[in-house]
Amino acid sequence: MTWEPGLVNAGPAKATVAAVTAVVQEGTRWFMYGPVAVDENFQGRGVLSKLLTGLSTVHLASYDLGALFVEAANQKSLAVHRHYGMAELARFTLGEREYVVFTFEPAMFAGRA
């Protein structure tokens, strides 16, 4: 679900690490988040909200930022991450696919009821 950026060495995750590293201030402590899939039967029931609250609460003291990638063709996922107020940091293309990099501060979600 979450991992250190240095553990990623392939695909869109590697490109996300490069995109975030190029933009964030040196010394920023950040982690990778995802991928996440919520079964259709449970969508709209707060599953992702609870997940973000839990992981942000755990990571609040150790990290300044969370980062993730979403394939640009996945309009539903883009809409969800925008709805949660995550910042669109960068875009990149890998092969034939375009991706959007989102970031968020754990404080946005930590401790929510």
Image (cartoon, rainbow, N blue to C red):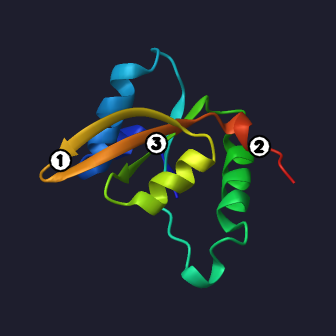
**Closer to viewer: mark 2 or mark 3:** 2
Residue 93, image x and y in percent? 20, 43
Residue 66, image x and y in percent? 55, 39
Amino acid type shown at disc 3: Glu
How far is the residue under mark 2 from the one under mark 3?
A: 19 Å
Q: Residue furthest top?
A: 26
Q: Which residue is mark 3?
A: 4
- Disc 3 to disc 1: CB gap under 8 Å: no
**SS under mark 3:** loop
**SS under mark 2:** loop
Left or right: 25 in relation to 9? right
Q: Residue furthest left?
A: 95
Amino acid type shown at disc 2: Ala
Q: Which residue is mark 1?
A: 94
**SS under mark 1:** strand
Query: Quadrant location of residue 5?
Result: top left
The answer to whether residue 11 of the structure is visible from this angle is yes
Residue nearest the viewer, comparing 49 with 9: 49
How far is the residue under mark 1 from the one under mark 2?
A: 32 Å
**Closer to viewer: mark 3 or mark 1:** 1
Q: Which residue is mark 2?
A: 110
**Residue occupying the point 62% across, 40% down:** 85
How far is the residue under mark 3 from the one under mark 1?
A: 21 Å
**Residue occupying the point 47% across, 59% down:** 77
Mark earlier in primary sequence (2, 3): 3
Residue 31, image x and y in percent? 51, 40
